Image: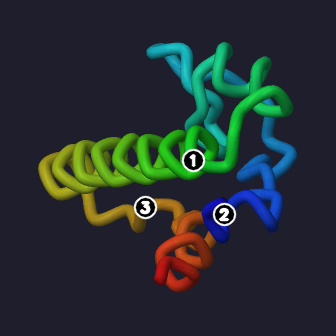
Amino acid sequence: MEQLDFFDVPSPCVGCCQVNNRGYCKGCYRSRDERFYWQQMTADQKINVIKLCRQRYLRIMRRQRNTDTQESSTPSPQQQFIFDDIQKSKP
């Protein structure tokens, strides 16, 4: 039995349940199916979803940063805190 099976992986939900133009939640970056089936997922599947969310977040922030530098110097929103804990807790 893996150590991940002993501890439940917390949901990355931050209570901002709005969908962007690609179908991902603007708060946690999960897809509709990832949000809907979260409770049925194994710990490994949840960690994989969180990794995917982090990649989506970074891709969106990179795209937004490129757009901001082309248009103006408006700072981008800071929300990476929901992913920092997962990276620090990895063995």
Circles 2 and 1 in contact, beta carbons < 8 Å = yes
Q: What element does badge 3 sit on?
A: loop
* Residue identifier under label 2: 4
Residue shown at 24% from the left, 52% from the top: 62
* Residue identifier under label 3: 76
Q: In this view, does 25 lie above or below 79?
A: above
Q: Distance between the residues labelled 3 and 2?
A: 34 Å
Nearest to N terminus: mark 3 or mark 2: 2
Q: Is residue 75 left or right of residue 10?
A: left
Quick one: quadrant of the N terminus?
Answer: bottom right
Q: Is residue 86 above or below residue 65?
A: below
Q: Nearer the viewer, mark 3 or mark 2?
A: 2
Circles 1 and 3 in contact, beta carbons < 8 Å = no
Q: How far apart are marks 2 and 1 (CA)?
A: 7 Å
Q: How crowded is mark 1: few (under 14 residues within 10 Å), some or many (20 or more)?
A: few
Labelled disc at residue 44: 1
Q: Is residue 87 left or right of residue 74?
A: right
Residue shown at 69% from the left, 39% from the top: 42
For badge 1, the amino acid type reads: Asp
Q: What element does badge 2 sit on?
A: helix
Q: Which of marks 1 and 3 is in front?
A: 1
For badge 2, the amino acid type reads: Leu
